[in-house]
């Protein structure tokens, strides 16, 4: 930053810049999709997506229309035990709607995941909600239920959990706490499409569950999301909030006396995106099976390497959705360098939220588990363009040492 750029900064801002550690240039830029490269993520485009989209483009509905309705119904049948579902423009939209429908207000306290995409927690900032971050479990990177128990109080109005990588959190324990305080559980299931907890699909357990259909998620609509709501009486309000606060059905019926009494947002999904979603649902069993097989093969190949621990492995009471393969290692940078030499991309992907300035005044307590793993977690490639042979190649590189 030049002297000209800094001259209008406050003293506090200047001191912050002076004390900031010099951050080196990214030594591991985004890897190109080229022959021989094992990229970290790759979108999965369903085989029939073009046909579904072309059909939609030939109709009068390309905004929110019948395809959105159909996608909501079919998604709910498959994953959400016929709960009310609202298709929206992003997972972040879905979370914001969940927080609104849960009745959160400025000044309320919410216990939320420390280690997650910032999208989990930024909507709480929109609303003026106080975030109390909970530490992670060292072996899953999911929210630590014991820390939740320590943090909770009569001021707590909700608990937000994230199923990291696709492994469900300890839902029984979280629900026990939530029942004691009569507060909702809001699940961020952005990683967990197709995951199960004790025989129940993620999406059919809690008061609210968000799913993300962002470009590289298990199901993609380009951008998009879904909110599953246990209490069906909230459907009408949710539908209004995602469309400016307007009652669309009343408006379309020519009722112009319908007042707008709730401040809404432009959060609806469109029929083009929903067409991609419907095509993805058609083949999702196959997609999920591939992701789970890749994850399982990683676990098998890496099990005898003492320096590596696979995050989220070995649970028999829940089903991992296989969205992300994360390992805990020592000398992370060295392994990343070794993998790059053999054309394998890796990275951290998510970061602890308390390190970001926007959350700086909202952190509470210490996070020993996160502190222990912060420099040791690494995400390896896992997506539907990969094969078992690709996993073997990556594991062979790792086995040679770093």
Image: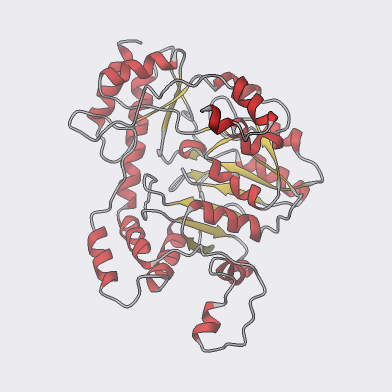
Which sits in the foreground, 387 or 13? 13
Q: How far across and down, in percent of the image, does residue 369 sit? A: 62, 23
Residue visible at 32% across and 59% down in the picture: 276
Location of residue 381 with respect to 66 vertically, above or below: above
Q: Quadrant of the C terminus?
A: top left
Taking the image as drawn, is residue 204 in sight?
no
Q: Please give the name of the residue rendered at 27% of the width and 70% of the height, measured from the top-left corner.
A: 57
Which is more toward the observer, 5 or 122? 5
User: Is 263 left or right of 31, judged from the image as shown?
Assistant: right
Residue 393, position in %: x, y? Answer: 25, 23
Position of 62 compared to 372: left or right?
A: left
Q: Nearer the viewer, residue 106 or 115?
A: 106
Q: Quadrant of residue 100?
A: bottom right
Numbered disc total:
0
For this orientation, the residue located farthest to the left is 35
Quarter of the rendering containing residue 299:
top left
Residue at image point 49% right, 30% down: 312
Does 115 sit above or below residue 225?
Answer: above
Residue 317 horizontal/vertical position (percent): 52, 37
The x and y percentages for residue 358 are 62, 39
Colour mapping: secondary structure
Q: Nearer the viewer, residue 331 or 193?
A: 331
């Amino acid at each position: 930053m030049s002297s000209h750029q800094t001259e209008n900064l406050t003293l506090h801002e200047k001191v912050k810049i002076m004390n900031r550690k010099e951050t080196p240039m990214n030594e591991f830029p985004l890897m190109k999709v080229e022959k021989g490269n094992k990229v970290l993520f790759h979108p999965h485009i369903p085989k029939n997506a073009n046909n579904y989209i072309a059909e939609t483009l030939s109709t009068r509905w390309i905004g929110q229309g019948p395809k959105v309705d159909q996608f909501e119904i079919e998604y709910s049948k498959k994953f959400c035990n016929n709960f009310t579902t609202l298709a929206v423009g992003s997972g972040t939209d879905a979370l914001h709607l969940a927080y609104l429908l849960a009745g959160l207000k400025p000044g309320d306290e919410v216990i939320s995941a420390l280690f997650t995409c910032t999208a989990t927690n930024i909507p709480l900032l929109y609303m003026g909600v106080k975030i109390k971050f909970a530490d992670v479990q060292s072996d899953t990177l999911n929210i630590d239920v014991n820390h939740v128990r320590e943090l909770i109080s009569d001021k707590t109005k909700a608990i937000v959990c994230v199923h990291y990588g696709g492994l469900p959190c300890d839902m029984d324990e979280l629900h026990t706490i939530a029942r004691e305080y009569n507060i909702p559980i809001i699940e961020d299931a952005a990683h967990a499409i197709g995951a199960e907890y004790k025989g129940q699909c993620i999406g059919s357990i809690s008061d609210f569950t968000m799913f993300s259909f962002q470009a590289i998620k298990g199901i993609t609509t380009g951008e998009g999301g879904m909110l599953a709501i246990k209490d069906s009486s909230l459907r009408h309000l949710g539908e209004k909030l995602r469309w400016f606060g307007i009652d669309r059905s009343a408006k379309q019926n020519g009722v112009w006396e319908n007042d707008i009494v709730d401040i809404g947002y432009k959060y609806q999904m469109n029929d083009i995106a929903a067409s991609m979603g419907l095509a993805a649902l058609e083949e999702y069993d196959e997609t999920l099976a591939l992701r789970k097989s890749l994850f399982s093969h990683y676990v098998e190949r890496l099990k005898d390497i003492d320096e590596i621990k696979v995050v989220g492995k070995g649970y028999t009471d829940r089903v991992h959705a296989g969205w992300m393969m994360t390992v805990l290692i020592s000398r992370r940078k060295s392994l990343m360098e070794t993998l790059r030499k053999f054309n394998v991309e890796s990275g951290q992907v998510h970061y602890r939220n308390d390190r970001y300035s926007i959350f700086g005044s909202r952190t509470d307590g210490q996070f020993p588990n996160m502190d222990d793993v912060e420099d040791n977690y690494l995400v390896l490639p896992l997506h539907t363009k990969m094969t078992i042979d690709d996993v073997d190649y990556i594991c062979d590189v790792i086995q040679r040492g770093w």
